[in-house]
Amino acid sequence: MNSHDFDIIRCPSCNVKNRVPRSKTGLRPKCGRCGTPLLPAKPVEVTDATFKQEVLDSPVPVLLDCWAPWCGPCRMVAPVMDQISAEFSGRLKVAKLNTDQNPATAQQFGIRSIPTLLLFKDGRLVDTMVGAMPKAQIEARLRQVV
């Protein structure tokens, strides 16, 4: 097996690097040391400092929810992000970026309105969804990529 046939995924619990065959990435792989699922079933908090590792270097597509605590529509979208994260676990990572606390990443992607959902695949931005949308509409856009 060469280096193109697997991804290195760091365990969120014990921080050990795991070599996961690409053919098994969508099957919810677990850490070889502690058994923790390597791809979370709930949204992951992302900061300016962790953006590259969590989003751009992710072995699976990432749906990034750009939000702020004071934003009413953002609070309406939060339970939908939790549901999508659980339903697409192993095939998609859902991440949350607080734009008030992480202005560099928000500025990099021109976030002017929240909530904004950014969909990344292979480290590239492939779709942008602005405003609170129904779950079915978000899922339809995700299915085009995932």
Image (cartoon, grey):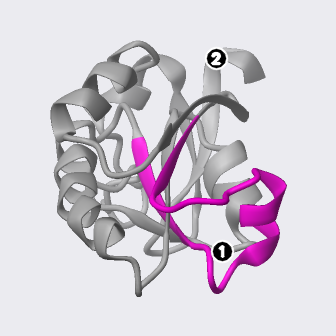
Query: Which quadrant holds residue 15?
Result: bottom right
Query: Which quadrant holds residue 123?
Result: top right
Could you tell me which quadrant the N terminus lies in?
top right
- Residue span colored magenta: 93-119
Whole-number angstrom distance, CA of label 1 to CA of label 2: 29 Å
How many marks overall? 2
Which of 30 and 135 lies nearest the eye of the viewer?
Answer: 135
* x and y, in percent, of residue 128 in the image: 56, 36
First in residue order: circle 1 vs circle 2 = 2
| Residue underneath mark 1 | 47
Which of 92 and 90 lies nearest the eye of the viewer?
Answer: 92
Query: Which quadrant holds residue 133?
Result: top left
* x and y, in percent, of residue 59 in the image: 58, 35
Say what amino acid the circle numbered 1 marks: Thr
Labels 1, 2: front one = 1
SS for dot 2: helix
Residue at 35% in and 67% down: 74
